[in-house]
Amino acid sequence: MPMKIGSLQLKNNLIAAPLAGVSNRAYRVLCKRYGAGLVYVEMLKVESFLHHNRKMMTLKYYRDDERPVGIQFAGNNPQWLAEACKMAQDEGYDVIDFNMGCPVPKIGRCGAGSALMAYPDRAAKCFEAMVQAVKIPVTLKMRAGVNEGCLNFVEMGRMAEGCGMQAVTIHPRTRAQMFTGQADHSRTAELKAALKVPVIASGDIKEPEDGLRVLQQTGCDGLMLGRGVWGRPWLFREIDETVRYGRVITPSPGPLERLSVLREHFEMLVETFDVATSCQVVRRYATWYVRDIPGSPQFRARLTRVNTREVFHEIVDEITDHFERAIGVPPDEQLGRARPKSEPALQTVG
Ligand SMILES: Cc1cc2nc3c(=O)[nH]c(=O)nc-3n(C[C@H](O)[C@H](O)[C@H](O)COP(=O)(O)O)c2cc1C
């Protein structure tokens, strides 16, 4: 289903969540390829964004092929947030989200992220400052509240709408819950009933049926996908098809295609980061891609210790060999290796 956030027209209502440490360019390109209507760079602390250090340049780096692309700020200083929004608009982002959902202490200690839900007056000042600073749409992402005794998501949603924010995403767990328990999407339905701007649901959408159920049960306008997409970017396409046709039409990629997407994911990381950082990042990603591949558990430990480009490709070659032998592919027909053994090893760069 197409969706509009203020003036921004999206091709569908499926959004790749901003994910600290995860939603880098490589991740976003794959989400987009497999059907995400909007992607986000990971959350940036407003002070760090304004400060502009080298790490920040890498984190906020995007290219036009990712559009529409959003940026997300965490902070609680209205003036800094306004300045950051102006800079983000100048840097060409299509939408700016305000993070009022992050529960981690590093952010909470600064009174930002979901901790800000305890301070509605301060939050309202931030909303106003951000909206008034730019012409592009500004949106809010929040939790259900600070804890079960402070479930103020409807109040916050109304405030955001009143200040001119153009959409509200809810991850319907409390700050106190962190990531435990289940996202309670009856709260998403309650928020949807209270607001006129689009409401986007985030939380525990891991299968195509989850997407359909949350859309139908809450009446929400869009879905934001996080952990369900890890190692499975085609979840966007699968939800889209399930909503349109009642079931997944395009078969999910098999093991060999998944391994090939993993290689591509790694090579795109190398384009963004240096090789050492790419290896650190891919240690996290690789196990997601191989988790369902028969025989892969024995390679998992090595994947989590990858330290060079060559070693990465060698392990993926071995998983491929192992899988092809297991399903009985004759050696002269084994196609799964993007880099045949006879080729020279890739040169390490960076
Ligand atoms: C590793 C990790 C990093 C996250 N980083 C962000 C972030 O930068 N900004 C944000 O709004 N939410 C962040 N979240 C929360 C997700 O966007 C999402 O709301 C939450 O994980 C629930 O959705 P899911 O069950 O689909 O993952 C993060 C979650 C995880 C697990």
Image (spheres, rainbow, N blue to C red):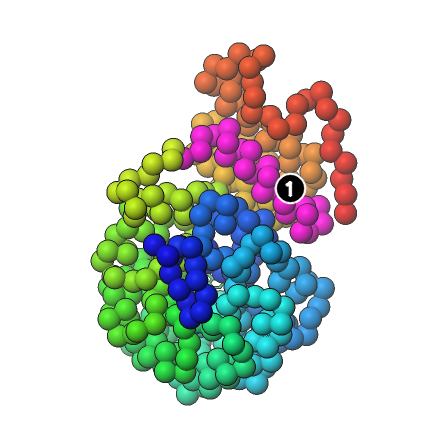
> Residue 96, position in %: x, y?
51, 70
> Residue 246, position in %: x, y?
26, 42
> Residue 62, position in %: x, y?
61, 58
Element assignment for label 1: helix
In what quadrant does ligand 1 lie? bottom left
The residue lying at 70 percent from left, 39 percent from top is 308
| Membership of 52 in magenta stretch | no
Give the total number of marks visible in the rendering.
1
Q: Quadrant of the N terminus?
A: bottom left
Q: Mark 1: which amino acid?
A: Glu
The residue lying at 38 percent from left, 35 percent from top is 250
> Residue 289, position in %: x, y?
50, 39
| Membership of 260 in magenta stretch | yes
For disc 1, the neighbor class at 10 Å (few under 14, some 14 to 19, many from 20) is some
Give the vertical position of 49 relative to 64 (above or below). Answer: below
Residue 263 in the figure: left or right of residue 8: right
From the viewer's side, name the closer residue of 157 and 13. Answer: 13
Taking the image as drawn, is residue 141 in sight?
no
Give the vertical position of 15 relative to 334 (above or below). Answer: below
The residue lying at 34 percent from left, 76 percent from top is 157
Residue 218 in the figure: left or right of residue 300: left
Residue denoted by label 1:
267
Taking the image as drawn, is residue 50 in sight?
yes
Give the vertical position of 348 relative to 167 (above or below). Answer: above
For ligand 1, tell me if the residue under mark 1 lies within 8 Å. no
Q: Over which residues does the magenta segment extend?
A: 252-277
The residue lying at 25 percent from left, 61 percent from top is 218
Q: Is the magenta stretch mostly helix, strand or loop?
A: helix
